[in-house]
Structure formats: structure tokens, C-alpha cells
Amino acid sequence: MTSAKQLFDLQQLDLMLNECRSRIDSVESHLNDRSHVDNLEFEIACLTESLDELRTNYAEQDIHNQKIQEKLQEEETKLYSGAIKNLRELEAIGKEAEALKEQSQAVDERLMEDMESIEALQSKLLSLEGELGDSEKQRQIDQVELGEELSQLARRVKELESQRKSMASTIQPADLNRYEHLRSAKGGQAIAKVERGLCRGCLMALPTHQLQRVRSGRETVLCSSCGRILFVS
Ligand SMILES: [Zn+2]
């Protein structure tokens, strides 16, 4: 007959195996998760595009302003050269120069605003690039450190699997089957320890006669509340 102790030991191995496998899954999914780096790269690309547009626009506006300034200078030269004597003509030139000055002022203001936007975007871009660099460095460290942990875990799983195989071979097939069924039905815990008269699987107190049967170790006893195989150490 298979003792509850044998099944309990098998369960300990299975729990350790589960733990190793779930750690492997979480490490692998962490290593494969590029979402943070991808998001940063996407943000940087968008920001770079906006910055390029702003700079192009700034350069165009700047050239436009230079042309206005040149024209203004021409008008002012005409105005103060003394070559033009006609009063009306002089007035017209004066008005034109005034209009050009206003235009240039308006463009100057826009240029100043654009420069502020450019500087704000530049500093945001710089900080995102720094964050990306840190993130990539951390990924490289993770690849090495977690890669090492993965190989250790793989070795441990192999070890546990071979221990499990030899342990399972000492258990009667029918008992092993029942154990497997219970294990999948009871969230991985087919065997429950009995401590201070309680089933540790469901925390219910066991009736005295059931407790005695478990203690005798002569038969497999299932908890009457949760259905797990009971085990007294
Ligand atoms: Zn129970």
C-alpha cells in the first residue's frame, strides 16, 4: 500500500516543480517584454518629428523676417536719403516702413514663442533619451543576470523531475492516478497535513474516529470536508 507520507513527499516535489516553472515563466515573460523600451522609442520618434517640423517652420519664419528687414531697410534708405522730395511719396514710404516694422515685430514674437516650444521639446527629448538609455542598460543587465537564473532553474527542474520520476515509480499506479486527479481538482494540494486535529487543507476539525484512522496509517483516509488525502507527520 502507498503511504500518505510517500504521496506527501511526491506533492512536496510537485510543489517545488510548480514554483520553479512559474518562476521560469515570469522571468521569460519579463525578458521578452520590450513594451517599456518600445513605448519610449515611439515617444521619442513622435517628439523628434514634431521638433523637426517646428525647426523647419522656425527657419522659414526667420528667412521671412530677414526679407521683411531688408525691405524695411530699403524703404528707410529711400526715406532718409533725401533723394525723394515729393511729400506724398515720402508719406507713402513712411507708412510702408511702419507696416513692415509691425510685420517684423509680429514675426519676431512668433519666433520667440516657437523657440520656447523648441527648447521645451528638446529638454523633454533629452530626458526621454536618458530614460531609454537607462532602460536598455537595465535590459542588458537583466539578460545576463536573469539568463543565469534561468539556467539554474532549468537544472533544478531537471533534478526535481528525475527525483519525481523515481519517487513516482515506488507508488502504485492506482494511487498515483488518484493523487493526480485530486491534485488537479484541489489546486495542486491533493494531500493535506493534519495538525492539532485540523485538516490543513480546509482548516476543519476532524472527527476523533477519522483522526484515529489517519494516525493508524493502515489505510488512505480522505478529509470528509475537502476530500484531500490526510497525512500525519
Ligand atoms: Zn480538509
Image (tube, grey):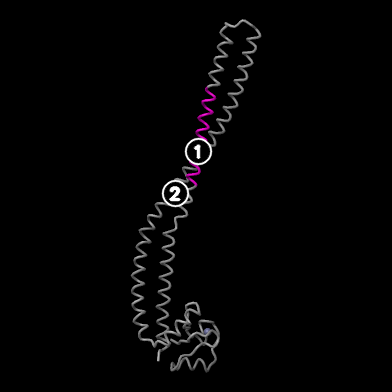
Q: Residue at x 57, y 33 (%)?
A: 113
Report how far apart the C-alphas of labels 2 and 1 lie in the structure. Answer: 18 Å
Q: Along the line of sight, which residue is nearer the eye, 205 or 148?
A: 148
Question: Few, some or many C-alpha atoms within 10 Å of disc 2 (few <14, some 14-19, many ≥20)?
Answer: some
Is-magenta flag for residue 138?
no
Quarter of the figure with the N terminus: bottom left
**Residue 15: percent from left, percent from top:** 43, 76
Task: State left or right for residue 51 relative to residue 165.
Answer: right
Q: Is mark 2 within 8 Å of ligand 1?
A: no
Tag 1 or tag 2, which sits nearer the N-term? 1
Q: Is residue 29 left or right of residue 77?
A: left
Which residue position is annotated with label 2? 132
**Residue in view at x 37 percent, y 56 percent:** 141
The percent position of residue 116, horizontal first and vertical second, equals 54, 35
Tell me which segment is drawn in magenta: 43-66
Identity of the residue drawn at 61% across and 22% down: 102
Relative depth, front residue between 113 and 205: 113
**Comparing labels 2 and 1, the label whose residue is closer to the camera:** 1
What is the number of the mark on residue 51? 1
Under mark 1, the amino acid is Leu
Residue 148 locus on image (x, y percent): 34, 63
Q: How many marks?
A: 2
Depth check, front residue: 204 or 48 = 48
Determine whether the residue tagged by mark 2 lies in a helix, strand or loop: helix
Q: Is mark 1 within 8 Å of ligand 1?
A: no
Looking at the picture, does residue 209 appear above or below residue 176?
Answer: below
Q: Secondary structure at mark 1?
A: helix
